[in-house]
Amino acid sequence: MRKLVACLTTVAALAALGATRAPAATVPVTADITSSTGWTSNNVYVLTKVIYVTNGATLSIEPGTVVRGEAESSPGANDPGTLVITRGSKIQAAGTKLAPIVFTNLDDDNVGANPGTFPYDSAANALSITGTWGGVVLLGRGYVANNTAGAPNAAREVQIEGLVAAGGLGLYGNGGDDDDDSGTLQYVSIRYGGFNLSANNEINGLTLGAVGRETDLDSIEVFQNKDDGVEFFGGTAGISHLVVASPGDDSLDYDEGWRGRAQHVFVMQGTPGTDKSDKGGEHDGGNGPDGSLPFAIPTIYNATYVGLGQKTYTDKAKNTALHFRDNAGGRYYNSLFADFGGAPLLIEGGSTGGTSTDPLTSGARSIAAYSIDGVFHLGPPSAFQLELQDNCFWCFGNGGTIPTGDATASGGDTGKIHHDNGAFSNGALDNDYFGCATPLPIRSRVRTVVPIGTIPDPITSIDPRPAPGSALIGASDRTAPAGYGFAHAPYKGAFGTTNWAACWTNMSRLDYFPTCTGANNAVPDEVEGPYVAEKLVAGGVRLTFVAPSLPGCSGAQVFDTLRSTDPTDFTAPDCIESDDGADAEVTDPDVPADGECFFYLVRAENACGLGSLGLRSTGVERTGPDCP
């Protein structure tokens, strides 16, 4: 039974965050990094061109450090400020929730204790900014499904897209090492980047070429990148707690045989600059030819993808949640896909058939058995190489139909016959479609009306946690198995009662997550984690905990503490603390009798209302009375 402790934010911590400190010194980075180097938070580092970390070096970056990238030096120079971690080198960039590491452009001043000035001060103003520098690129020595039709080739290597070839520094692959380690990215915000070298040859917000599964990727935001948010090219890297906000193209993209995992992925589509988000996930298989090995079969749990909405706009029907093509497989479980203008799902077949008549297509992956072979299938077992199970779909422009036949008009691939894998018709898969007239399954989503009819209305406020009573709450039929790096999450979508994207992301700083405006959208998160119970010499027990976070990083105001002698029954508890101050401790004057146990729940409260008492192990939210 989970009892206490939370994600942040004590008054002392906020005071430290806003403390006055000397202005950071600017350090231009003008040459490749060939020996291990540390970047510290008292400096701002400026990438003046494409900077490679090479020669086996490790770049270590302190929490709270800001790294800026310059734009292309002149038209056609193809040298925007970009950080590339080459094969055999590492990055160790472990920020914290209160001190994330920020990669951004030269002008973004919404960092640290600064609230930001125009146009970096609000979501509406910042929506015009994208493509102002390069991005972050990690390269490893995993397998790449590129020109490897006969068998996986450990020696295959490829030049990463978006960069001009630089004497082999931009190559990935050539090692066949699924356990390759490119370092750590944790609590990292990547903002306003992206660069188009040529058509279909762009720098993404975060690009991962043949990166191995020993690389630690957790709590990463890509905000308004010109091209894709995150793209995997081969490899086996896993990622968790990923935020992709308003990319100029696809949100989560993979190609060339990615076989990794992802969990807790939040996508919010939008219209940065003159761009417009495309697919929620564009999923490609091999390259040159499509059937190159190993096959792309990643596993994704607990995603929330929110599309461009239902206004009539240019190419609305092409705004698809998931597009599997070029022989890609992949498995999605316990996820939410909501408010896309087109279809929930496109599965590309071949030119003569959707499945078995064209055996190297995504349609064929949806009927091919998935079996653990110990080498190239790395995720938890399931029935098929392409599978969707225990997911929720809400409000799609085509009414939730999976297009078949020639799906060109729906954003499918010209000349290809598309396939319906039974995601909605096969009851055993337990996928639910809810029409637009049904209640929104998340707590809130607000769009600002744009008078131009050809442009989608952008989201300006969103609380992506499950709405009370929605189909997202409750134990899923698909439990993430142990041993594959997935955490147990008794809900569908990327969030439970806690908004883990609050406080450290640019979305949070620009107030995308709602504050109290008369609706119960910003009540405190669940108090969670371990707690400290200390028996006092004078009698009684003292409990110590940490206040939960809220959108905007504001902590809870007061707390209630409920006590029961039965861990399953808090219907008539003793109220040990009622509307206590913001201090994160409480003293219970009583101690349990011999053979008796006390069980406690702590609930936070702010001006918006009472917070959550948390979820039971079944996923059902706990209930308990208000303390007088």
Image (cartoon, grey):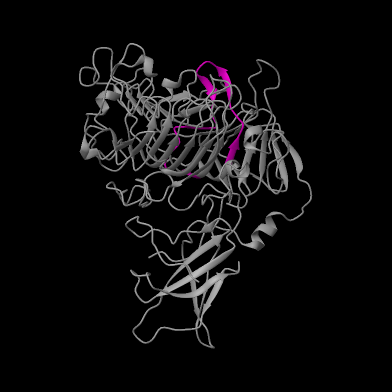
Q: Residue furthest right?
A: 22
Q: Quadrant of residue 296?
A: top left
The answer to whether residue 174 is visible is no
Query: Which x, y percent locates residue 399?
Result: 34, 27
How many numbered marks appear? 0
Residue 460 horizontal/vertical position (percent): 57, 37
Q: Which residues are magenta?
A: 189-218
Q: From this viewpoint, is residue 552 visible?
A: yes
Q: Residue 392 or 134: which is nearer the viewer?
A: 392
Vertical comparison of 173 with 122: above or below: above
Of 315 and 24, which appears nearest the observer? 315
343 inside magenta stretch:
no
Residue 518 versus residue 407: which sits nearer the camera?
518
Q: Is residue 84 left or right of residue 323?
A: right
Instruction: Say whether residue 209 is magenta.
Output: yes
> Where is 272 relative to 42, above or below?
above
Q: Residue at x 65, y 38 (%)?
A: 122
* Spot occupied by residue 508 in the image (x, y as percentages of width and height): 59, 44
Q: Quadrant of the N terminus?
A: bottom left
Residue at 68%, 41% in the rendered image: 110
Left or right placement of residue 446 versus residue 128 in this view:
left
> Can you give x and y, in whole percent of width and height, for residue 204 in the image?
53, 28
Q: Nearer the viewer, residue 607 or 266?
A: 607
**What residue is drawn where x is 63% and y is 38%?**
103
